[in-house]
Image (spheres, rainbow, N blue to C red):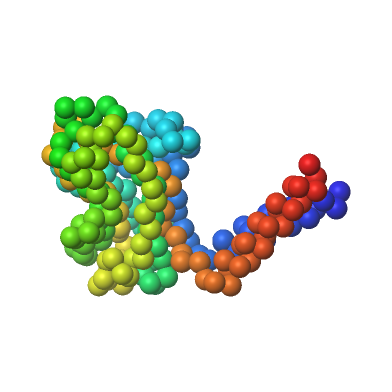
């Protein structure tokens, strides 16, 4: 019984630290739906969700629209809206992150010569900014797109650093993905798309302590 209580206490510690950091949202597509994501500026679009790379991920094909997929909410109390309101009040304290999985094995003769991924942020007052400068969030060259290989990774950036001048007090937010390239078969799988607070060093230490405790408890129990 003591081990069970200790395990529960460890879980509670980790959860409490995460909750104390503030509002956040994460899209994992674990219910096999596209979870409210639409096409460019709210256009209807279907994004298949498939099990790849060890998890369910949403596939966004490059159609040539440039802004290919987005999620948008006004003052509706959704997790996305609440997270963005908190991020709008403290941009330096929030990160945007996501995982990508690019499988070029089926691109073949339609692979093109390059493929790039970026993001954009738009608000109700008309603010629009995109992270698509000289250095892209993800970029494959000609050899890579023609390789037939899988390219995967994690992207994380600070909102204040990437989207400067975000107006305070916004009540509508749109976060989206840019895909740019010259091959008709291109696209990427996306997972764990999140807007979340930047963990403070002390909180990171507590989370690490809690997770270490959980590992030790599990080892003793096994």
Depth order, front residue of 80/15: 15
Q: Position of residue 186 (x, y in %)?
A: 22, 35
Q: Position of residue 171 (x, y in %)?
A: 32, 62
Is residue 125 shown left or right of residue 84? left
Depth order, front residue of 181/31: 181
Q: Position of residue 38 (x, y in %)?
A: 28, 41
Q: Position of residue 187 (x, y in %)?
A: 26, 37
Is residue 186 shown left or right of residue 22? left
Depth order, front residue of 159/117: 117
Residue 14 visible to the viewer: yes
**Residue 65 to residue 105: above or below:** below
Depth order, front residue of 202/167: 202
Q: Residue at x 21, y 27 (%)?
A: 108
Residue furthest toward the right? 1
**Residue 50 to residue 101: above or below:** above
Q: Residue at x 71, y 53 (%)?
A: 214
Indicate the quadrant where residue 92 lies.
bottom left
**Residue 27 to residue 172: above or below:** above
The quarter of the rendered structure image containing the C terminus is: top right
């Amino acid at each position: 019984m003591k081990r069970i209580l200790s395990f529960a206490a460890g879980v509670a510690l980790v959860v409490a630290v995460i909750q104390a950091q503030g509002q956040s949202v994460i899209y994992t597509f674990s219910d096999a739906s596209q979870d409210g994501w639409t096409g460019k500026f709210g256009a209807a679009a279907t994004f298949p969700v498939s099990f790849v790379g060890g998890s369910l991920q949403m596939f966004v094909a490059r159609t040539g629209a440039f802004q290919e997929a987005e999620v948008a909410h006004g003052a509706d109390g959704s997790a996305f809206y609440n997270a963005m309101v908190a991020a709008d009040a403290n941009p330096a304290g929030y990160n945007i992150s996501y995982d990508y999985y690019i499988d070029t094995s089926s691109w073949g003769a339609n692979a093109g010569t390059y493929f790039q991924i970026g993001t954009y942020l738009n608000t109700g007052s008309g603010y629009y900014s995109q992270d698509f400068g000289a250095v892209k969030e993800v970029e494959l060259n000609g050899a890579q797109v023609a390789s037939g290989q899988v390219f995967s990774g994690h992207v994380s950036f600070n909102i204040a650093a990437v989207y400067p001048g975000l107006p305070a007090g916004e009540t509508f937010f749109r976060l989206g993905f840019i895909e740019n390239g010259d091959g008709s078969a291109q696209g990427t799988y996306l997972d764990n798309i999140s807007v979340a607070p930047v963990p403070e060093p002390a909180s990171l230490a507590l989370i690490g302590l809690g997770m270490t405790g959980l590992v030790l408890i599990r080892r003793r129990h096994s």
